[in-house]
Amino acid sequence: MTSQTDLPPTTLADLNRHIQQRFQDLTPQFQVGARYLLDYPAEIPIASMRQVATQAGVQPATLVRLAQTLGYPGWAELKQVFVQSLHSAPRHYADRAQTMMRGGGVKDIYTRTLNTQADNMRLLGELPTGQIDDVATHIARGRHVYIGGFRASFAAAYTFYYLYRLFRPSVTLLRSDAGTLEMDLDLISRHDTVVIISFAPYSHESMRVLEASRQA
């Protein structure tokens, strides 16, 4: 008979703690898969097991065995924890978008959008001036500057790249859609500066750029 304490975690918070507690005892391949679960929880509910395995860099069978090692019958049961977490998460962005669409005509939406952008710009004034100066100096001193922003962050990264290219030629926009990312990452040296524009949960590409930068 299985005791209550033998049951696998049913919430994402408990699962994260369970993985962290057992992480050092996992095999190297299990650690790779477990690290992906910890770093990209939002990807798990919307992707197939094969897609998750590809993004994590492991075989699909590894994910099945990892799930069983963590106490679940299989991958489907482990994935369900992430699905339930997604359903219970607050939907602030979606709620705001729906409220905006219901809140009036085009002029009203336009005005509120401009006000939101203005508020975001004002928030920049709350950042420590010294920290901004340090970042700008670090970027300027780089022999070459690599800029990475993927998926939803690509537009911001491209805008920064386009504007900065007006001032200096030694700037490269890192891209994953043309199959050149790995070649560009091989060119990064310790004399260069890498700018990553992203937000949690961070994309697999952003983490790959971060790892390559640290290695360089």
Image: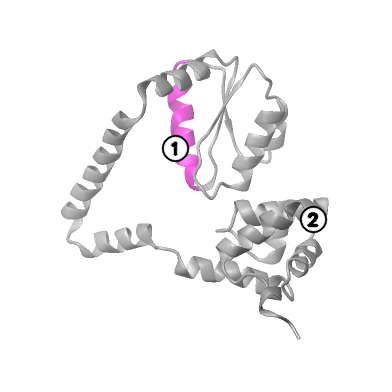
Q: Is residue 13 above or below residue 35?
A: below
Q: Percent from the top left, x then y, of residue 144?
A: 59, 18
Mark 1 Cα shell of 10 Å, populated few (<14), some (14-19), many (≥20): some
Q: Residue at x 20, y 62 (%)?
A: 103
Main SS category, magenta section:
helix
Instruction: Judge from the rendering whether residue 167 lies leftward or rightward of residue 43; answer left or right.
Output: left
Q: Is residue 194 above or below residue 74?
A: above
Q: Amino acid at mark 2?
A: Leu
Instruction: Judge from the rendering whether residue 54 lies leftward or rightward of residue 203; answer left or right.
Output: right
Q: Residue at x 43, y 25 (%)?
A: 163
Mark 2 Cα shell of 10 Å, populated few (<14), some (14-19), many (≥20): some
Q: Secondary structure at mark 1?
A: helix
To which residue does mark 2 refer? 26
Quadrant (top left, top right, bottom left, bottom right) of the C terminus: top right
Instruction: Judge from the rendering whether residue 7 lies leftward or rightward of residue 172; answer left or right.
Output: right
To which residue does mark 1 refer? 156
